[in-house]
Amino acid sequence: MTDRFRHGAASDQALILVLLGPPGVGKGTQGSLLADSEGLLLLSTGAILRAAFEAGTPLGKQAHGYMHAGELVPDHLIDDLMAERLARIDPGSGFILDGYPRTVAQAKGLTEILRGLARHLTAAALFDASDEELVRRLSGRRSCPGCGRAYHVEFGPPAQQGRCDLDGEELVMRDDDEPETIRTRLAVYRRETRPVAEYYRELGVLLSVDATRPPAEVQASLRESLAVTA
């Protein structure tokens, strides 16, 4: 991993980064770009939950029980799953967390997990954009019900409006991409997850990234901020 992304009292700790931001802001894309270029693990809550369930672990079975019932997995169980996964990472390896922590309780849980591993968070990157921009991005998504190919009416439209380039099927919009549904999701984010950013601001590790720019510029800004932090 590149030296400029090592962090710690003697620059001996690999990067540990939390990604924060509302739906549609592009944090997953930015995390993937950074992870691929720097040889970092990119860990998402969803992937860890699926892996634990498929492996048949006790924690995975408990979490699946909540999800199967349509309930949120409790913070303490998410923390236990993350602790189990992070303990298996080589102490010299860096990683990026996408989708965790989602609440202040989980953020405090992560602090304790890292303390138990004798590691600490390098930074939390908050990707931000206006609600109008996020609604524009998400509500423009379309997909083909036949082959599953994805499009965007503005950023990646099909050759023929409303029709898939591959099989000519009529493109559809997902229910959760309806503008009103998106605004509801954004309201939930502000209520439940945005306070996590304030928690990290108080700890002095929050980085703000303007996510309204083109992806390459957003990535450059993130890397520059992390280089300064290191």
Image (tube, helix red, strand yellow):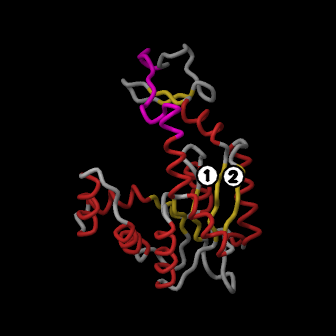
In percent of the image, x 66 and y 51: which residue is there? Answer: 128
Residue 190 drawn in magenta: no
Question: On the picture, is 175 further left or further right than 37?
Answer: left
Spatial separation of the CA atoms under disc 1 and disc 2? 6 Å
* Residue placed most toward the observer, 33 or 193: 193
In percent of the image, x 29 and y 50: which residue is there? Answer: 70
Return the x and y of residue 206 as percentages of the image width and height: 67, 67
Q: Which mark is residue 99?
A: none
Residue 169 drawn in magenta: yes
Which residue is disc 1 drawn over?
30
Label 1: which secondary element: helix
Return the x and y of residue 106 as percentages of the image width and height: 46, 69
Q: Is residue 208 above or below residue 146?
A: below
Return the x and y of residue 215 as percentages of the image width and height: 68, 44
* Residue placed most toward the observer, 109 or 2: 109
Amino acid type assigned to the residue bearing label 1 in the image: Gln
